[in-house]
């Protein structure tokens, strides 16, 4: 399910469900954080990007990512 292009509030609801589910649901989970230079209001600024990649019980891979200030997207 992809929720790219959806209002940020919907992504936040999905993120909250994901945060609160039992960890036993995700046999493999990799967390990553990095800084990217992004253009914001005509200036280039450094922005934190947080990402999680996991594999569920059925072997399906999923990704969810978010910048520090707003929702970006998810796949899986």
Image (cartoon, rainbow, N blue to C red):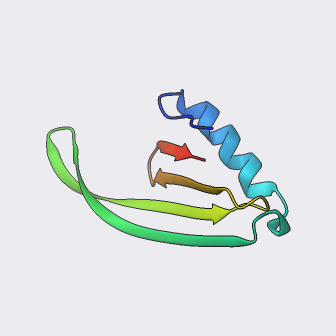
**Picture quadrant of residue 54:** bottom right
For this rendering, which residue is in front, 63 or 57?
Answer: 57
Residue at image coords 44%, 48%:
69
Q: Position of residue 76 (x, y in %)?
A: 60, 47
Query: Is 10 placed above or below 18 here?
Result: above
Residue at image coords 56%, 34%:
3
Residue at image coords 56%, 63%:
52
Horizontal arrangement in the rendering, residue 43 relative to residue 25 (left or right): left
**Picture quadrant of residue 29:** bottom right
For this rendering, which residue is in front, 42 or 74?
Answer: 74
Horizontal arrangement in the rendering, residue 40 relative to residue 71 (left or right): left
Residue at image coords 67%, 63%:
55
| Residue at far front of view | 59
Query: Is 9 placed above or below 68 here?
Result: above
Q: Quadrant of the N terminus?
A: top right
Horizontal arrangement in the rendering, residue 15 relative to residue 67 (left or right): right
Horizontal arrangement in the rendering, residue 36 relative to residue 31 (left or right): left
Q: Position of residue 58 (x, y in %)?
A: 77, 58
Q: How many discs appear?
A: 0
Q: Position of residue 68 (x, y in %)?
A: 45, 54
Q: Position of residue 21 (x, y in %)?
A: 82, 56
């Amino acid at each position: 399910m992809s929720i790219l292009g959806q209002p940020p509030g919907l992504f936040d609801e999905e993120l909250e469900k994901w945060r609160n589910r039992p960890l036993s649901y995700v046999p493999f989970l990799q967390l990553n954080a990095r800084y990217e230079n992004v253009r914001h209001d005509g200036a280039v600024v450094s922005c934190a990007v947080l990402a999680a990649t996991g594999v569920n019980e059925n072997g399906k891979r999923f990704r969810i990512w978010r910048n520090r200030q707003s929702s970006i997207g998810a796949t899986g």
